[in-house]
Every structure is written in C-alpha cells, then in structure tokens.
Amino acid sequence: MAIGPGFRQQQRQSQKLAMTQRLQQSIQMLQFNVEELRDFLTQKALENPLIDVDTNWNANHASLTAAQNMPSHDDFIERVSTTNQHSLFEYLLDQIHLTMRDTKLRKIVLTLIEYVDVNGYLKVDDDQVMAELSATPIELLDAVTLLQQLDPPGVGARNLQEALMLQTESDDHAPNLAYIILEENFDALVNRQWDALAKKYQVNLADISSVYDYVRTLSPTPGAAVGQETTGYIFPDLVVTQRAGQLALKTASMAQPVVKFQGNYYQQMSQHSDQEVTEYLKEKKSEYEWIASSLQQREATIFRVGTVIIERQADFFLEKTTTLKPLLLRDVAQQLQVHESTISRSINGKYIQTDFGMFELKRFFTKAVNKRPTDGKVVSADGVQHRIVALIKQENKEKPLSDQKIVQILKSENVELSRRTVAKYRENLNIPSSSKRKQYLRTE
C-alpha cells in the first residue's frame, strides 16, 4: 500500500487495563456501603438461581444516625430530624379524590380502602360491603377493579398470586409469558416445575427461568413501601474495642450479607442433558464464584484500611484525645501499596463502631494545617476546628468573636490561617456568623 509523503508507518506497544463488566462490578462492590451491597446482592440472587443471600440484618447492630453517637461539638447547634410520613390509606385517598368523580362507585372504593392492610392487601367480606352500601356484585367488582388500578401496583389484591399478576400487568417490560403463567400455573412456577411449563407453553427452559427470575423481583407486599418512615440505618463495617489499653479490630459480621451456593438446585439441574441448560448452569456458577471472591476481597481491603486508621489515630480510639492526627489518602495508599482511589472507595460510606459511637471512616482523614515553630508538632484541620469550637463556646455572647478575631487568636497560638479558611471551618461546623450568634443578655 502506497503511503503519501510526510507519512510513515510506526508500530507501538502499549499496555491498557481492559475494564470488563465483572471488574467494574468488583470496584462497585468495594464502593457500596452495607445497605447498597445488600441491594446489589439481592438483585444478583434474583437473576441467578444458584445464589442465595443471607442479609443477616439485625437492627440492634445499627445506628439511626451517625450524629446520634458522635460527641457533640457545641451546645448551640440544633440538629432536627424530620419525617414526612404518608400512610397508605392517605395515599390511596388522595388518588381517589384526584381521579374519580363523585359517584356511587367512588363511595364503594372509599369504603374498600378502609379494609386495605398495611401490605396493600384487601381484607374484606364481599357480602358485608354489598350489604353496607346496597351495592350489587357487579358494582363491587367494578369498584375493586378501580382500586387495583391505583398506585402502588398490586394494591387491592386478595392474595399473593393476584398481587403478582397486578404488578406484572402494569409493567410494560414484563416477559410475555409472565402474566399467563401466574394466572394459569402459579403453583407450578413456585414449585419450579419448569420442564412441565416449558412443554406446555412450547418454550425453552431458559424462557421459564427468565419468568421465574422476573417474578422474584416483584414485591409480595406491594403496599409496604408506602407510609413507611425512612429510618436511615447505618450499618458498621468494622468494630474496634479496647481492653487494658490495647485496641482490637474485627469485621462487623452481624451486618454483612453472606452469599450461599444453592447446591441442591445445581445438582438437580445438572441431571439435564440439554446443552443449553449445561451452559446456563456453568455461567451462573461462575458468577457465584466471582461474587463470593469479590466479597472476600472487599472485606479484606476495608479491614486493612481500618487497621492503618486505628494505628494512626490510636489516641482517639483510646479516648485520650478528641482531635485527630493529620492523615491523607496517599499515606494509607502508600502503606498498603494500592491506588488512592481504592482507599477512597474503601472509606466512603463505611462506618466503624466504637465503645463511644459510630464514625464514618473518612472522618479520620484530615490534612495538616501547619507546623508549630515552637515544638514542631503538626496541627491537623480537625484539631483547628476543635479549637474554633472551644473559642466560640468561651466567647462573650454579647460580643461574639468575629472570624478575623479568631484568626488573630490562632496566630498567637502559632497557627496561621486566613479569615476565609476560618469562615469555611465555621460553616462546616454549622456555627452561625458572629452577628447571628450575638445575644442580648437581660440585666436586672
């Protein structure tokens, strides 16, 4: 092939990291907090019949908020937790008033929602409602149909089968056979009689498997998600304890999800001579092995990072001080010989439980502000913030300290900071400006 003037062929050799889907998901698993990890593994279990997930959840090992367990920096910062709880009954009532005209059918629907339990199921005696409202069987049927068209999908069902059918009917992306199998052969699907179903509907086992996997994604309690107050549980990844001045670190196993291999199901399906089934099982078993390995790697990485943290911040965990020593991501990355991004993923949304509270791992990372010329000690940003809190606590409330005045006091203590930096620290601590902190004390 002729090459024009000014051009020449060159051969270069380079190395590139191919980010396979599994490698990307391994990175995601490290970044997930415990709750996100549970959701991820639960979804994997829905897609893979060889995976069973034991969430091992125990509310006694969780904290409602990190702030509840953290030592308070000051007395004037108010933290208010608000919830906007909307019951299932109120949610349905709003929809009825917004979508239905004032007719006899609407009155029947309004009566019916009084018999919908917290899980969304309609628990009512038809004869009782018809007698109460002088309604005919057709009117009652129409009212139930209107109720079942409300949100969330599945509400108004009389049993589990109907709840799943209603959710499938409202889902445009449901497998084609899902609704009819639920309607005609619910028990056979639940009992995994896939061979019989495949023959009846003249499809492959993989098609029946996809229907089964889809049905497992549906909610058996369609109304439970409405009207439930968000609790905001925080699950610890690590637990540190102290005894006789010594610190011990361990994984918080009570909160960690566990994946189990469905050996009996694997053996049962292995009896099939169908090559398609064999390949399917091979793929799903490989996925299970990868997930189990990634979980072990995730736990080991977080534990190694936690070990370095308690070594560097030992005085904090031994309750000898409330201030932290300077610690950067690159310090831990260099010690563990990994990339800084790995440390960042390992600490984001991960918590450590102590005898005196629950703390996010990234809280223990703070940069150095400056070196004191008098004693050579390094001052961390966390230490400076503690000092700012102490100064404001001791200030004259009628003449509160301005940011510039705090700068001058810190400078006299050999800490060089700009007024802008002090203002930033103060805002991070949720401390109002001096003008908003001013109090006019009553004099007798």
Image (cartoon, rainbow, N blue to C red):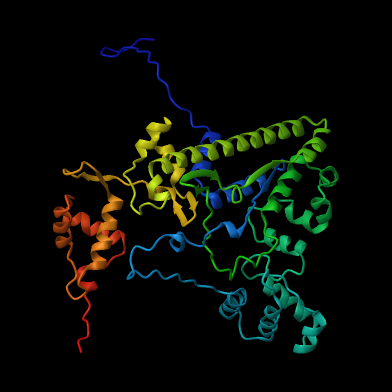
Identify which residue is drawn at 82% across, 57% down: 184
Above-or-below relation of 59 to 250: below
Q: Quadrant of residue 131?
A: bottom right
The answer to whether 363 is drawn above or below residue 118 in the figure is above
Q: Residue furthest top?
A: 2
Residue sitting at the far front = 244
Residue at image position (81%, 47%) is 192
Residue 338 can be seen, yes or no: no
Q: Would you say 277 lies left or right of 242 here?
A: right
Where residue 68 appears, as percent x and y from the top left, is 46, 63
Residue 225, position in %: x, y?
61, 65
Residue 220 lies, with reference to residue 299, above or below; the image says: below
Up-down relation of residue 294 to residue 214 (above or below): above
Image side of residue 273 versus residue 23, left or right: right
Can residue 110 be seen at all in this image of the molecule? Answer: yes
Image position, residue 39 (x, y; %) = 59, 51
Looking at the picture, tell me which residue is in the foreground, 320 or 89: 320
Task: Say which quadrant the C terminus sits in.
Answer: bottom left
Residue drawn at x 54%, y 54% as measured from the top left: 235
